Every structure is written in C-alpha cells, then in structure tokens.
Amino acid sequence: MTHCSRELMHEQWGIILDDDFIEAWQHGIVVLCSDGLKRRFYPIPMAYSADYKEK
Amino acid sequence: MVNLQPVVEDDRDSIDPEPVELDDSHLWLLERRPWTQRTNRRLPLRFRDVLPQPLPPLQSAIISQPISSPVESSLALSGQPEGSESNHPSLPSQDLSRPSHVDTPRNIFGLSRRVRSEVIPSPDPEDHVSAQDLSTIPTHDHPDSTRLFYPYPNRNAFLLGDWYWNDGVQKSQASFDRLMGIVGSPDFKPTDIRDVNWHKINNVLGSEDEWEWMDGDAGWTRTPVTITVPYQRRRGVPCEPLAGPRGYVIGDFYHRSLVSVITEKLSRLKESDLFHFKPSELSWQRAPDHTPIRVQGELYTSPAFINAHQALQNSPPEPGCNLPRFVVALMFWSDVTHLTTFGDAKLWPLYMFFGNESKYHRCRPSCHLCEHVAYFQAVGILSPIVSSWFTNRISYSFQILSKILLQSRTLVGKPLIDHS
C-alpha cells in the first residue's frame, strides 16, 4: 500500500505539473492585466504544506 | 488584528500621581476611598488596545542612495547566514552595484518598509489597505445582498422561498403564523418580491444538484491515473518469467490547469486586490537610533521572495521581450477532508494560494483567495473493493517473495517460517 500511495501521488503531481506549467515556470507567461499593462509572470512554487498518506 | 504589539516601555507614566495620599490601609478594602472618586484615571499601558494601522505608504518614502551596511546587518539579524548571498550565483552582482532603495518612515508600531527601486513604485498595494482589511471587527455595512441570498435576489424573497419549500406540504396554523411573521415583519418590503421570477429561481435551485464543475467550461479536467503494481496472476503459482509490475488504472483524477488558474487570477486583478508584485523588506525599529530588525511575516517580505525577485531581474530577459517581470509565489496546501460527521466519506483536495497576497486576507474565506486545484485520489479512500484488491495483490507478492527466499534458505537449513 505504501508503494501504491507513493506511486499514485507522484503520478498525480506529474499530471498537475504539466508541460504548460514547466514552460511558464521557466519562461514566464505574459498576462494582460486589468490596468491595461502587459506583464510577464513567473509562477514559482514557494510553499508546500501538505499531509501525505503514507500507508 | 495587530501586526505587532506596541512597545511597552514603562508603566510608570500611566499611574497618575495623587496629590494627597491618605493612609487608609487600616480599613477594609470596601471601606477605603472608592476608586470611582479618583480622577484622571487611565488604564495601564499594557491594557490599552491600539487599533491596527496599515504599513506606511510609499508615497511618504525617501529615496536613498545605494544600500550600505544597514541592510546587511538587518539581513544578518533576520537569521540569514552571513555567507548566504555568495551561494546564489545571481546575487553577487548586487554587491557591486546595489540599486537604490526606497525607505518609508516608521508607523506607530515602529514598522517600516524598504523597496529596492530607483523610483517610488506605483501602484503600491499598501495604499489600498483600509482599517477593514486589518481588523476583524464586523462592520455595519451590508454586503452585496444579491449574492448573499443567491439565487434569491434579497432576504425577503429568500424567506418566502424558504417558507414555500421547507415548511411542510400541508398548510397548518403554525405555518400560517410563520408566513404572517415574514410578511408582517417591519423589514418586509413588498417591492422586494414584486418582480421576482419564481419559476426561474426554482429551476436554478433544481439544477444546483448537477455536478457543476464536471463540465468543460468550469476548467476541470479528468485524467485517468495509472500506477504500476507488482502483480501476480494466481495465488500459489511461482512467478512467471513475464510476470512483473502491471499498470493499474486507479480512476479519474480531477484537476485544473495551473497555468489557466494563474492566468485567470492575474488578468482579473484590481488595484484593490492588494496583490504585491514587488517584494519589500519589513523592518522594526524600537527607536530611530536603534538597529532595524527584519520582520518576517509575509511571503512577499521574506528573503526567499526577495532573492527570487532579484534573481529574476538579474537574469537575461526572454528574447524580444522587455515586459516587466514578476514572481508569482504559489503556495500549496493539502490534507484529507472528512465530508460527513458520520461515515468515512473523504476527499483529498489540493488548494493553491498566492504568496503575493497578505496572509491576513488569505485566511479569510470571504476574500475567496483560495483556489481549488485538484482532488487527489488516494488508495485508502478508494472503494473497499479496490483497496482489498490492492492488499490481496501485495500480500500475494510478499508470499511469493518469502517462499522464494525460504526455498533458498532450505538449501542451507530448515525454513524458519512456514508460509504455506
């Protein structure tokens, strides 16, 4: 079960952190903000506070 | 919600001198001079409550020359190792050409901000901080009542709808009294319900049970998850040469695209949303001549954010792009969530917050700053049939493995455990 939980969690995080996100993380995404200005944003995961089902 | 307690310097100033101090210590407490007769009373300083105050705005700031020792000393005081800057490949250039910085004056709590910038940054999110953002004291302002009672347009329509649906199918005297209580209330206004489209509201109510977030427009996607599991076809049969880990489809994994969530959030930002694009250093000084001490509280004032921002500014820009670049700090949070008081229905949601926003706003559900990103599948919260399938499969695998080990053990001695 530990093996399955770990595999499942890694598999799901692999889906969440998809290619689009990796591209945005490395090269940023250009967003037209509501004030009419374009900015380039770099999303960076800075905190991960989560419980994990070990068993 | 006070950021920092004010400095309690001395209580002596709060004890007012009394002109004539009569010795009444021989009397009972109740017989002594009543405290109500004392004049000019003030609470001791430690009991006085100070209303929260926003951080000083940058408009009142002073642009200083390149940063010198105070920042380094404050960085050292904040617990950052002395040599940490040299660990970052992009940072040493700052030591040679440190940019100018903007310092704000201290507020009543001794807090001041410092932004590394040549000019006063605009817009400054702290300009829009009001007392309501800092305090949890409820106000008398009524929130937007049209959203509060959705799909009903106002409170009176909601009360009537509630009476219609939830007060039983048969009319009774008590039910009639409740209806009279609604329409007889001083708050009841006939104009509230005059133009209400009851059919439409009832249709909306009836359709609320649909899985709203499962359609494609809501941004949720379903992806089947496959994991590899040690697999054995039949119990008691030794491993076949081709037997090995097999893929098993766990089920559908519901998630949203991170990029689309971030893009949607950023494109809808308003100035009043208090979203910090640029980091700032928050410092505390007991007095003007004291050494400033870094205050750690928000992600956008943390060394991690400042370093990331500086590293991004120092990095070469994207080819053919000279747009301003900013860090969007993502903060993930996840834990198992029980859905019912009884039973074991659970979900394992993944939430995402933006560290560019103040923690005091993120922690308020009414601010809607939390994004649902995914609902994890977990082996333990699958159906019992699937779980038992896993358990059986894995126990088979262990039995086969232990048999092989024990068989090899019989070559040298007796088996220790009989697993047959």
Image: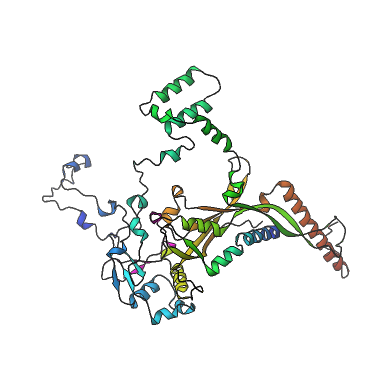
What residue is at 34 percent from the left and 72 percent from the top? Answer: B118
Q: Is residue B341 magenta?
A: no
Task: Residue B11: name its quadrant.
Answer: bottom left
Residue B4 visible to the viewer: no
Given the current orientation, which residue lies at the most extreme bottom position? B96
What residue is at 44 percent from the left and 50 percent from the top? Answer: B367
Q: Predominant secondary structure in magenta?
A: loop
What residue is at 47 percent from the left and 70 percent from the top? Answer: B308
Q: How many numbered marks does the figure carry?
A: 0
| Image coloring type | rainbow
Work out whether residue B238 or residue A26 is closer to the camera in this orientation and state it.
A26
Task: Residue B46: name its quadrant.
Answer: bottom left
Quadrant containing the C terminus of chain B in the rendered view: bottom right
User: Would residue B85 appear left or right of B119 to someone viewing this image?
Assistant: right
Q: Is residue A10 above or below residue B93?
A: above
**Region of the chain picked out in magenta, as a range:** B270-299
Q: Percent position (x, y) of residue B277?
A: 42, 63
Work out whether residue B144 or residue B352 is closer to the camera in this orientation and state it.
B144
User: Would residue B374 appear left or right of B279 to someone viewing this image?
Assistant: right
Q: Is residue B188 above or below residue B25?
A: above
Work out whether residue B86 or residue B226 is closer to the camera in this orientation and state it.
B226
Q: Percent position (x, y) of residue B368?
A: 47, 50
Given the current orientation, which residue lies at the most extreme left position? B20
Q: Percent position (x, y) of residue B36?
A: 18, 41
